[in-house]
Amino acid sequence: FGRSAQHHIMQAHLAEGGWGVFIEEGMIVLAIGESRVELMELERVEFTINGKVHFQVLNALAATAAAWASGLNPAMIARALTTFKTSTDMMPGRFNVLDMSGVQVVLDYGHNEAAMRALGEGVKALGDRKTVMVIGLPGDRRDNDLLATAKATLPFVDEYVLHDLLDRRGRAENEVPQLLQSALRPDAPYEYAPEQQQAVMQAWKRVEPGDRLIVIADVVDDALHTLRLLSDALAEDAACLTPMATHQGEE
């Protein structure tokens, strides 16, 4: 599978009668040798955001190729691609996009440089917004890897809340957050938090409706639990602010 049938490896594979899956004129195409079958329009695959998120396009192509090679009916493949969503129910921690009181919340389990670059591509496809990131990274990584991961966020993050993990994996308290901070732009606002839940709560104070909050999950279930607690609190606050209906009787 690949983005284009013109790639030399794909061309050589198809020339030998091989099976291939690629994009052609906005369509996902199934090919055997010179034979071509258009499966569906890429724009109908919602999780690729109209084909703008490269890594999600590749995920869609890989899934299509695996399913087709396993003998699944192409109609079933198309149906799966159009109904699959990167929601917290289907794929928790994998580029989940939520709306919380007008704030766009992105939850992702990105813990290395390549994952952060892919996340940045996905965020760019969502549009420009002020972006605050909650991030804590495992201590059992080389300093250079941690620094590279932090630097990969610079093109798409404005402010940071940096935190330790509950298991610091041999690092001293605040050692990793301080290392990450050293990779940030000198003018980038930041603050520290002792752990993930507190970091999310602190970051929430930095955003307003229309902004974006990215949470890099350590333990995905814990991150989701924190966001649900925050969402429930926001719902309660909204209910308290809703004016009670009044009845004006005749005097």
Image (cartoon, rainbow, N blue to C red):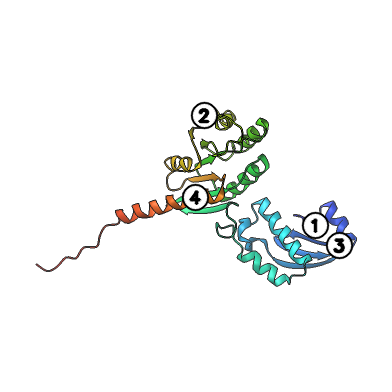
- Cα separation between marks 3 and 2: 53 Å
Q: Nearer the viewer, mark 1 or mark 3?
A: 3
- Residue bearing the label numbered 1: 5
- Residue bearing the label numbered 4: 104
- Cα separation between marks 2 and 4: 24 Å
Pick whichever, 55 or 149, lies toward us.
149
**Residue 18, numbered label:** 3
Q: Report crowding for label 4: few under 14, some 14 to 19, many 20 or more residues within 10 A (C-alpha).
A: many
- Cα separation between marks 1 and 4: 36 Å
Instruction: Decide which of tag 1 and tag 3 comes sooner along the chain.
Output: 1
The kind of residue tagged 3 is: Gly
The kind of residue tagged 4 is: Gln
**x and y percent of residue 251 in the render?**
9, 67
The kind of residue tagged 2 is: Asp
Instruction: Decide which of tag 1 and tag 2 comes sooner along the chain.
Output: 1
> Pointer 1 and pointer 4: residues touching (CB < 8 Å)?
no
Instruction: Decide which of tag 2 and tag 4 comes sooner along the chain.
Output: 4
Instruction: Decide which of tag 3 and tag 2 comes sooner along the chain.
Output: 3
**x and y percent of residue 105 in the render?**
50, 49
> Pointer 1 and pointer 3: residues touching (CB < 8 Å)?
no
Q: Report crowding for label 3: few under 14, some 14 to 19, many 20 or more residues within 10 A (C-alpha).
A: some
Q: Nearer the viewer, mark 1 or mark 2?
A: 2
Q: Report crowding for label 2: few under 14, some 14 to 19, many 20 or more residues within 10 A (C-alpha).
A: few
The reply, left or right, for residue 133 in relation to residue 9 is left
Q: Nearer the viewer, mark 1 or mark 4?
A: 4
**Residue 77, numbered label:** none
Q: Secondary structure at mark 1?
A: loop
- Residue bearing the label numbered 2: 187
**x and y percent of residue 193 in the render?**
48, 36
